[in-house]
Amino acid sequence: AITLGSAVVCNTVVGLTTWWPVAFVMFGVEIYFATLWNVITVSLRQRIIPDHLLGRVNSVYRFFAWGMMPIGSAVGGLVVLGVSSFTTRDWALRTTWFVNAAIHLGLFIVGRAKLTTARIEAARTAALGST
C-alpha cells in the first residue's frame, strides 16, 4: 500500500512545486517506490502462478502496463487541452500531475482493501496446494 500511496504524494508535490530540486527528489522517490512495486508484484506472481501459466500471465500484465502508456499520454494531452481553455498553460500542465495523483489515490484505496496479507497468504497457500 505504501508503494501506491507514495505516487499520490509525489505527483501532488510535483504538481505544486516550481522549484526543480523538489521535483527532482520527488521523481527519485517515486522511481524508488515504483521499482519496489515491480519487485514485489513480479515476485508474488512468480510465487503464486503455476509455471505453465506464468508466461501467459506476464504477457497480459506487460500488455496492460505498456499498452496504457500511449493511452495515458493521449489522456494527458486531452487534460491539458481541456483545462487550458479556462486557466493558464502553466496550470493546465500541472493539472496532469493532479489527475495522476487522483488516479493513484483510487488505486491506493482499492489496493489497500484488496491486497491484504491474508489474501496474499491465501493465494500462496492455494499455489502450494496446487503444485
Image: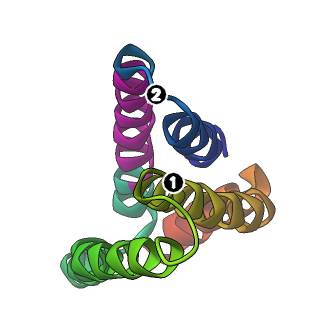
Q: Tag 2 or tag 1, which sits nearer the N-term?
A: 2
The CA distance from mark 1 to mark 2 is 11 Å
**Region of the chain picked out in magenta, as a range:** 23-41
Residue 18 marker? 2
Task: Assess whether residue 64 is covered by the magenta stretch.
Answer: no
Identity of the amino acid at label 2?
Thr
> Taking 37 as reference, is 73 above or below it?
below
Residue under circle 1? 91
> Taking 73 as reference, is 122 above or below it?
above
Residue 29 relative to residue 2: left or right: left
Residue 71 relative to residue 11: left or right: left
Image location (x, y in percent) of residue 22:
45, 19
Residue beneath the point at 59% across and 55% down: 101
Magenta stretch, main secondary structure class = helix
Residue occupying the far top of the picture: 21
Task: Assess whether residue 27 is covered by the magenta stretch.
Answer: yes
Residue beneath the point at 31% across and 78% down: 68
Query: In which quarter of the view is residue 59 placed?
Result: bottom left
Residue beneath the point at 59% across and 38% down: 6
Residue 62 relative to residue 91: left or right: left
Q: Secondary structure at mark 1?
A: helix
Query: In which quarter of the view is residue 46 placed?
Result: bottom left
* Quadrant where the C terminus is found in the figure: bottom left
Query: In which quarter of the view is residue 10 placed?
Result: top right
* Colour setup of the view: rainbow
Residue 6 versus residue 61: which sits nearer the camera? 6
Q: Are marks 1 and 2 in contact (CB under 8 Å)?
A: no
Residue 53 versus residue 9: which sits nearer the camera? 9
Image location (x, y in percent) of residue 117:
73, 50
Q: Residues within 10 Å of mark 1 (few under 14, many from 20)?
A: some
